[in-house]
Amino acid sequence: MPHSSKTNLLPFVEARRVVEQCAAKLTATGPELTSLLDALGLALAEDLRADRDFPPFPRSTRDGYAVRAADVQAVPVDLHCVGAIKAGGDTAELKVRAGEAIEIMTGAAVPPGADAVVMVEYTETRGGRVTIQRAVKAGENVVHAGAEANSGQVMVSKGTRVQHAVVAVAAAVGRPEVAIHRRPHVAVLATGDELVDINLPPGPNEIRNSNSYSLAAQVYEAGGETTVLPAARDEAAELALLLRKGLEADLLLLTGGVSMGKYDIVEKVLASLGAEFFFTGVAIQPGKPVVFGQVDMEGKTTPFFGLPGNPVSTMVTFQLFVRPVLDALGGAKPEPLPFVQAELKETFTTRMGLTRFLPGKLGGSHQRPEVEWVRWQGSGDLMSIVKSNCYIVVPADRDRLEAGEGVTVLLA
Ligand code: AMP
Ligand code: MG
């Protein structure tokens, strides 16, 4: 029974492995062509290849003089200046012969005959002559044609999520449209008698359903799209009906109703639909009651997560466990969690046994990244999460983290 196994908590690392293994078996959504900027955040369904050499010509990396390195060994040396070339300029008529130099700008093609560029700072011009004060080696300040990529070479491989640098590559190889995997479709179902939709006034002891919206936002940021189902009351028949609807999606995300309370019926109702549970609790805080499994229904297998209802728990467990599934469904290569190290500003004490992911604020400087605790009233505290930009990780075998020690931080 899923409920009795709630005490059977998986260690965090194992739970993450279970998710990654299940994710590896999922099939990605189909490809479609989309305009470049609409591809942001989605996974490429094709390799982006160089349509010519990069750079396409030997490119000067400096403003200065294109020279033959052999002429510029014993310095100072006087060369005859026979022309000038700017970025985009034509070199067809130009040639650097022995004893000659051509004035050149950053990004311009190094003209035939020249094999190095001397920075303008080390030169002095007088009439048609230039004095070079510093020796150069062949190839200095020149990136030769094809040094970054040869024509036909893969510059960005399929499965890479499109961000600004990928956009730059696509633009550079002349691709106003790229093939991406469609956004996987995620159903979001909040549960709880206390929930009121955000466009209705809540009663004195009711709360607005913020989780459906934060989850929809997290799903969108992770390259998915959502159908937000109406919140289910803590009542089996109604929940079963909405669950069936939600299981039509590529992934179903539930929030609330997975703890040990009398009205936490999500697992029971999932079980009644024949759900297979991969885990029903993880040794973490916040988010301990998180549930992961799948349901086979009418020949379709749909993975689901039951995320705890406290808003911070919902957000943390999404990041820890849901992302690998969304990556896989969206055709993106698996990504490790973004952990970094920072110096802890203030000592923290707790109990051992759970791996904790507690709201933190990463700051300091590039020489010395620091992280501080954000005070919180527990995992229901939305204020703590908007003030934080990361989670400080407290390993399960530590009951004390000292001010000044290097701690692991999960970027939010
Ligand atoms: P549960 O996991 O169902 O025990 O819910 C834990 C607590 O999280 C509830 O008491 C609510 O205060 C809060 N909560 C549950 N669902 C939501 C939701 N959809 N939006 C905002 N808060 C919620
Ligand atoms: Mg509830």
Image (tube, helix red, strand yellow):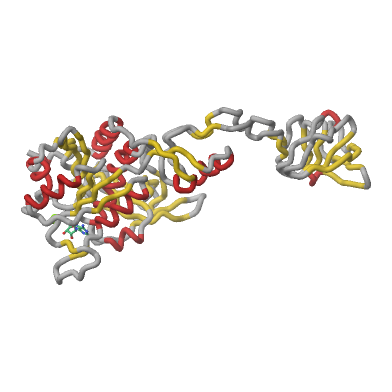
Question: Considering only vertical position in the picture, is 337 above or below 215?
Answer: above
Residue 356 in sight: no
Foreground pick, 330 / 207: 330
Q: Residue shown at 10%/40% (left/top)? A: 273
Q: Residue shown at 12%/60% (left/top)? A: 193
Farthest-out residue, right:
127
Q: Residue shown at 43%/40% (left/top)? A: 161
- Position of 377 with respect to 76 (left or right) is left
Question: Considering only vertical position in the picture, is 6 above or below 386?
Answer: above
Q: Quadrant of residue 331?
A: top left
Foreground pick, 200 / 399: 200
Give the quadrant of the N terminus: top left
Residue 184 in sight: yes
* Residue 78: x %, y % from top left: 91, 38
Q: Quadrant of residue 299?
A: top left
* Residue 25: x %, y % from top left: 28, 30
Foreground pick, 149 / 378: 149
* Residue 248: x %, y % from top left: 21, 42
* Residue 386: x %, y % from top left: 34, 60
Question: Considering only vertical position in the picture, is 36 above or below 387?
Answer: above
Farthest-out residue, front:
33
Q: How many marks?
A: 0
- Position of 328 with respect to 110 (left or right) is left
